Image (cartoon, grey):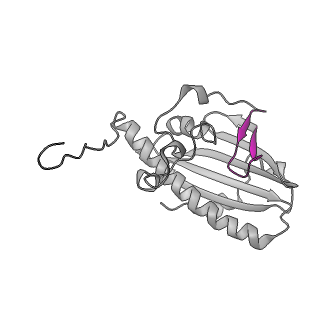
């Protein structure tokens, strides 16, 4: 799934831009899913380490240990974020995100500090006009100061891959939800002669 933000999306101001200030390195990603913002919101609200995990499609999750796979349904206990809440992050043992702004079902902004570098991560949902229900999911990560730009560029490649996985995994979960949670089930393998 493509996760390229349009030129207009890259130039637009987003909630949370003011958190890290001028001179920030900015990574913009965006993708469209077949659902309304209200249907997408609960899935994004529960993202995170020690929560719902990170969503990947089943094909990618098949190589991930079961305990580390993203959940495949909405969990009520992870639907109540508020400004100031701390979410553990995969960015190191002490990595975290703090909720900086939340406006359901459109805006979720996190902030953090990693080794003296401030960062913000904004997730915004926008309805896509048309006959079908679609939502544009825009993600903006801003970092400042960035001391090693070459290393940040490598991080950008990792960001593209993980957001592409998120996009495909989220679309798959939304489709399963639309189909009444009838996720594909593995059939029990039977061998000739029984057993």
Do we see residue 143 in this rendering?
yes
Q: Nearer the viewer, residue 45 or 8?
A: 45
From where the camera sits, is residue 130 visible? no
Where does residue 135 sit, x and y in percent of width and height? 52, 46
User: Relative to 182, is 124 on the left or the right?
Assistant: right
Q: Is residue 99 above or below residue 27?
A: above
Q: Position of residue 8 (x, y in %)?
A: 65, 61
Which residue is located at x 63 percent, y 42 percent? 48
Q: Residue lying at the far left in this picture: please name it.
A: 193
Q: Which residues are magenta?
A: 84-99
Residue 105 placement (x, y as % from top left):
60, 35
Instruction: Please tell me which residue is depicted at 76% across the width and 50% down the height of the picture.
Output: 120
**Quadrant occupied by the C terminus:** top left
Taking 151 as reference, is 1 above or below it?
Answer: above
Which residue is at 46% across, 52% downward?
A: 61
The answer to whether 1 is drawn above or below residue 149 in the figure is above
The total number of labels drawn is 0
Is 16 magenta? The answer is no
Q: Is 164 in front, or is 38?
A: 164
In the rendered image, the vertical position of residue 124 relative to residue 11, given as above or below: above
Q: In the figure, is residue 95 to the left or right of 174?
A: right
Q: Is residue 49 left or right of residue 165?
A: right
Q: Position of residue 19 (x, y in %)?
A: 83, 48
- Seen at 60% across and 62% down, the residue is 160
């Amino acid at each position: 799934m493509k996760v390229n933000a349009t030129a207009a999306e890259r130039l637009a101001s987003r909630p949370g831009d003011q958190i890290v200030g001028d001179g920030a390195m900015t990574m913009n990603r965006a993708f469209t899913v077949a659902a309304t913002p209200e249907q997408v919101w609960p899935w994004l609200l529960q993202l995170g380490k020690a929560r719902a995990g990170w969503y990947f499609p089943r094909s990618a999750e098949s190589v991930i240990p079961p305990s580390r796979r993203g959940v495949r349904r909405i969990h009520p206990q992870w639907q109540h974020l508020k400004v100031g809440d701390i979410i553990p992050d995969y960015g190191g043992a002490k990595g975290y995100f703090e909720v900086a702004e939340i406006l359901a079902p459109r805006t979720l902004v996190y902030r953090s500090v990693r080794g003296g570098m401030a960062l913000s991560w904004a997730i915004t949902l926008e309805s896509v006009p048309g006959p079908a229900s679609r939502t544009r999911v825009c993600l903006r990560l801003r970092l400042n100061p960035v001391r090693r730009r070459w290393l940040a560029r490598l991080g950008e490649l990792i960001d593209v891959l993980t957001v592409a996985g998120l996009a495909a995994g989220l679309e798959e979960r939304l489709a399963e939800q639309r189909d009444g949670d009838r996720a594909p089930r593995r059939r029990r393998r039977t061998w000739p002669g029984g057993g």
